[in-house]
Image: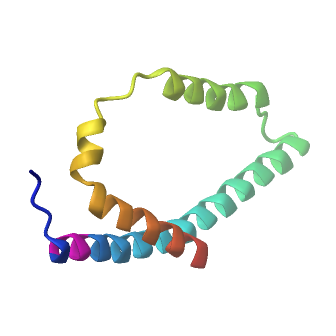
Amino acid sequence: MVDINPQQLGLELGSGAVIGGIIGFAAKKVAKLIAVLVGLELALFKFLESRGILTVDWERLSGGIVEASQNAASGAPPSWVNTILSTLSISAGFTGGFFVGFRKG
């Protein structure tokens, strides 16, 4: 029979939620910064291309993104069932905290 300590379970859930909230908040801020930088870079590419300074092969640029996503989708997942079961309490707290932090960020 499994021995469950409610105090330990609550501590793991709470600490996971706090850590997840902090990381979610920071992740949203970093994602916004990266989105702005990528947008500015693409706008700069388009501007330099319109001036004849730079030539951008847009097909190859977007083809690399499609190829990377296909490679990620075709990979076989590792044995993750045991990992999820062993870290379920802290993972649940982290996930909840991450979503709250990401939403507030």
Query: Considering only vertical position in the picture, is 19 above or below 91?
Result: below
Query: Considering only vertical position in the picture, is 12 above or below 35?
Result: below
Magenta stretch in the rendered image: 8-12
Left or right: 49 in relation to 23: right
Residue 35 or 52: which is nearer the viewer? 35
Q: Is residue 74 visible?
A: yes
**Residue 33 horizontal/vertical position (percent):** 60, 66
Left or right: 97 in relation to 7: right
In the image as oriented, which residue stretches furthest toward the right? 50
Quadrant of the image occupied by residue 97: bottom left
Q: Is residue 105 visible?
A: no
* Main SS category, magenta section: helix
Q: Which of the image's four quarters has the C terminus? A: bottom right
Q: Residue at x 50, y 75 (%)?
A: 101
Residue 76 or 72: which is nearer the viewer? 76
Q: Residue at x 14, y 63 (%)?
A: 4
- Whether residue 89 appears in magenta in the rendering, the answer is no
